[in-house]
Image (tube, rainbow, N blue to C red):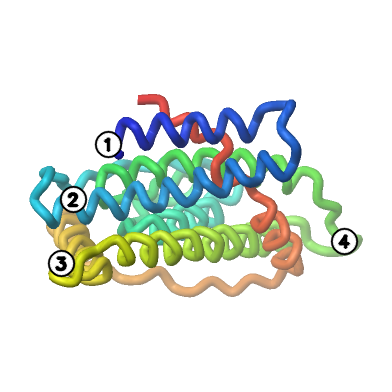
Amino acid sequence: MSEDAKLRKIRQLLVLAEDPGATPAEAQSCRDKAERLMAQYGIDAALLAKDGHRAVGIVDAFVRLDAPYVRDKATLAVHVAHAMRCQSVLVGAEPCISVHVFGLEADVRCTEILVTSLLLQAAHELARVEIPRGEHVAAFKRSWWQGFSQAVYVRLRTVEDDARAQAQAGRDDGEPSVEMVLADRSHEVEQVMHERYGSLRRAPRRRLSGTGIDHGYASGERADLGRGTSLTP
């Protein structure tokens, strides 16, 4: 299936998932298929590039994030990028931070789409949460964002692992393994990133005191990883 055909398929699945006439089970089935295809889409791009069928280069894009809770939103963007096989660098400082994403075009594009969608969903979910009486509002919300980001990452990684297994099952014995192909591609992505920024250091681990992590994780488990991904060219 060509990349354009895959994009059309994902669009169709997401339209069906949002159809008012679809049952909850049918809608969820369409979303699950869209998620799997998005994961497979990126893997296929790497395999095609390795096999020489098509030249696929490394691209980059800036995902701009704004206050409030910009660092927490950046964490979500980084989690999504990593789950989609991309590398990322935080650029700027509060109140406006950008996440500079590097990866295959398919992976970077899906990262941008998912982050945009998830930020909207998270804002809607967080507005409905009842913060425990007496708790610091900002502390609760920061920990909520952490839980939301963790749940999204776990779900995306599960889809990714399933896609890798399916891709490997379709490979001939004489072909490079999916893991080897993706490891080579990851190395290329890192090289491009380091050519741009040189040596990088990891951001220090944050210590969050709020009790919203479980609420955020539950919301992340409910998040629609396909909603809003119309993938308009």
Q: Is residue 28 left or right of residue 80?
A: right
The residue wearing badge 4 is 132
Q: Is residue 45 left or right of residue 62?
A: left
Residue 191: which quarter of the image?
bottom left
Q: CA distance from mark 3 to mark 1?
A: 21 Å
Residue 86 horizontal/vertical position (percent): 32, 56
Which of the two labelled residues, at mark 1 and mark 4, occupies the earlier sequence position?
Answer: 1
Q: CA distance from mark 4 to mark 3?
A: 56 Å
Inspect the image, locate mark 4, and give the three-letter code of the amino acid beneath it.
Pro
Inspect the image, locate mark 2, and give the three-letter code of the amino acid beneath it.
Leu
What SS does tag 4 mark?
A: loop
The residue wearing badge 3 is 175
Q: Residue at x 64, y 64 (%)?
A: 147
Residue 131 horizontal/vertical position (percent): 84, 56
Which of the two labelled residues, at mark 2 and mark 1, occupies the earlier sequence position?
Answer: 1
Query: Which label sits on residue 143?
Result: none
Q: Quadrant of the C terminus?
A: top left
Q: CA distance from mark 2 to mark 4?
A: 51 Å
Which of the two labelled residues, at mark 2 and mark 3, occupies the earlier sequence position?
Answer: 2
Residue 196 horizontal/vertical position (percent): 16, 53
The residue wearing badge 1 is 2
Q: Which label lies toward us, 2 or 4? A: 2
Q: Are marks 4 and 3 in contact (CB under 8 Å)?
A: no
Inspect the image, locate mark 3, and give the three-letter code of the amino acid beneath it.
Glu
Q: Quadrant of the N terminus?
A: top left
The residue wearing badge 2 is 48
Inspect the image, locate mark 1, and give the three-letter code of the amino acid beneath it.
Ser
Residues packed near mark 4 inside 10 Å, few (<14), some (14 to 19) or many (20 plus): few
